Image (tube, grey):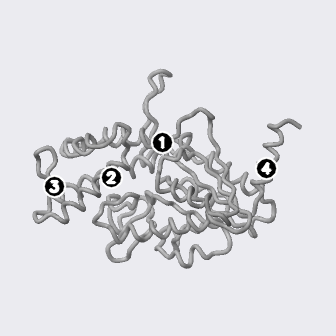
Amino acid sequence: MGLFDETVEELIKLLSSDNQNWLFGAGISVEANIPLMITLTKRVEKQLSDNFKILYQIIADDLLDNYHIEHVLSHIGDLLALSQRSRYCCVELKGNTYTKDDLLSLHTELVRQIGKTIRYGYKEEDITKGIPERVGTIDQPIAQIQNHREFVKALLSSKANLFTRSSISIFTTNYDTLMEDALALEKLSVNDGFSGAAIGFWNPDVSFNNISGVNMIKLHGSVDWIKDPTIGLIRNRYGVDYLGASEDVLIYPQATKYVETQKDPFALLFTKFRERLNSPSENLAICAGYSFGDQHINSEIDIALKATKNKTTLVVFINNLNEVLTDG
């Protein structure tokens, strides 16, 4: 048996482990017509109306050349913090004065455009191959789920009839709902921190203590998470306006106005991530479609792997050994 065959055999053994923790990034949804962060950024920028473009460009110009939309949202959050400490509740950028409301309005519009793009899918034009731009809509979505379902089927088959005794958690930085949808379509319970039905309420103490099914932990939020001022965090159904518009979508990073929201759910979700990366017994952490572009996630992985009593094995799937990991 050659080295490659031995490596594959060892990998198969690892993937049959009872304790599995999958970390997914944007790469797993590219073929599903969900854009990577840079493409998403270009799409959002293109969709901005003129009254938002000036402030957006001023903020973008202050960032590194390889910025993406999450960097812009983070920067807006920092500016909001400054405006809230200011006597006049404003900031000065390139000789212009912008109020807290100006910043919040831009943040709201960016989140709205992100939600619309992720929900229905988007494929940018490929001039070299003569492939035109494709834009998903509520009437004609182009987001596909087949690859996600095939993954779930493979996960099930690898566990045979021992799946209910296994401990499997899926962590993702993605805003789309394809993975939890695929789990449900393959008749698996999804523990995502919510209780309820198509509309769910944030109830992590109950949801994450469910001993059956798969833990689905969305580290950066989701396009179907809504923050309601009265009820709290809700997993909402598309196309209804019981609680509010898509502007209330809760994705990370949020504007600094919502500091309490940043503590929960995001702090709790990262605590779950930290806990699952550390284990005194055999434990597996597998990364796919994630290019290590989020330093707060990388730090948690680094700390866990350096812990002396931790028995977690890290497996990373990549397309090309020579590729540069830049776009989580």
3D distance between C-alphas at marks 2 and 3: 16 Å
Residue receiving disc 3: 91
- Amino acid type at mark 4: Ile
Task: Indicate which disc residue 73 carries.
Answer: 2
What is the spatial separation of the Cα atoms under label 3 and label 4, in whole angstroms? 55 Å
Tag on residue 256?
A: none
Three-letter amino acid code of the residue under disc 2:
Leu
The disc placed on residue 327 is 1
Q: Disc 2 or 4, which lies upstream in sequence?
A: 4
Callout 2–callout 1 Cβ contact below 8 Å: no
Tell me the SS state at disc 2.
helix
- Disc nearer the start of the sequence (3/1): 3
Mark 3 or mark 4, which has the lower sequence index?
Answer: 4
The kind of residue tagged 3 is: Val
Instruction: List the single residue furthest toward the front.
Output: 308
Residue holding disc 4: 12
Secondary structure of the residue carrying numbered label 1: loop
The residue under the point 50% across, 54% down is 173
